[in-house]
Amino acid sequence: MKTKMLWFSACAMLLMSNVQASYGDVVYHYCYVGKPPYGKVMYFSEAFGVPSGTYEVGITNAFHSFVAARLDPEASAGGSCMGPYETMSDAENALNDDIADERRNGNDVVVTRWRYRGD
């Protein structure tokens, strides 16, 4: 019985390790923030790579600070950084889909060309 339990435990651990996403040393994100009321103007970063494990709140704060300081101090509605994505292509595709959705919804889109460069 003990051998059977160990075998099942080993199989379960093997299955769990295969199910988890295996991101590499770099993961990819993009960020956006809207201007009130209701995000009628949306500011987007470009897709960018960061070392895996980078503090995502720091990335979001850096983007918000950039937009507020350089483009629009009122931009603050519904901002976020999306990801992590496993490849740059995945991040760029998701970014382009979000930009297209915002345009279809009648919102103005500003692509800032910002990307996270670290602390």
Image: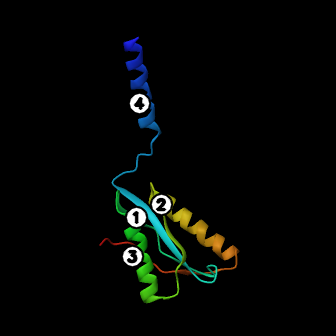
In the rendered structure, the answer to whether residue 111 lies left or right of residue 65 reads right
How would you rate the neighbour count of disc 4 (Cα within 10 Å): few for under 14, some for 14-19, many for 20 or more?
Answer: few
The picture places residue 22, in percent across and down from the top left corner, at: 41, 46
Q: Which residue is mark 1?
A: 56
Q: Secondary structure at mark 2?
A: strand
- Note whether 108 is above or below 85 in the view shown: below
- Badge 4 amino acid: Leu
Q: Which residue is mark 4?
A: 14
Q: Between marks 4 and 2, how big is the CA–CA gap?
A: 26 Å
Looking at the image, tell me whether mark 3 or mark 2 is earlier in sequence order: 3
Q: Residue at x 44, y 35 (%)?
A: 16
Looking at the image, tell me whether mark 3 or mark 1 is earlier in sequence order: 1
Q: Nearer the viewer, residue 16 or 46?
A: 16
Q: Between marks 3 and 2, how big is the CA–CA gap?
A: 16 Å
In the rendered structure, the answer to whether residue 10 lies left or right of residue 77 reads left
In the rendered structure, the answer to whether residue 1 lies left or right of residue 80 reads left
Q: Secondary structure at mark 3?
A: helix
- Note whether 113 is above or below 47 in the view shown: below
- Badge 3 amino acid: Ala
Looking at the image, tell me whether mark 2 or mark 1 is earlier in sequence order: 1
The reply to whether the C-beta atoms of the residues labelled 4 and 2 are less than 8 Å apart is: no
Res. 83 mark: 2
The reply to whether the C-beta atoms of the residues labelled 2 and 1 are less than 8 Å apart is: yes
How would you rate the neighbour count of disc 1 (Cα within 10 Å): few for under 14, some for 14-19, many for 20 or more?
Answer: some
- Badge 1 amino acid: Glu
The picture places residue 109, in percent across and down from the top left corner, at: 59, 80
Q: Residue at x 39, y 70 (%)?
A: 59
Q: Residue at x 37, y 19 (%)?
A: 6
Q: Which residue is mark 3?
A: 62
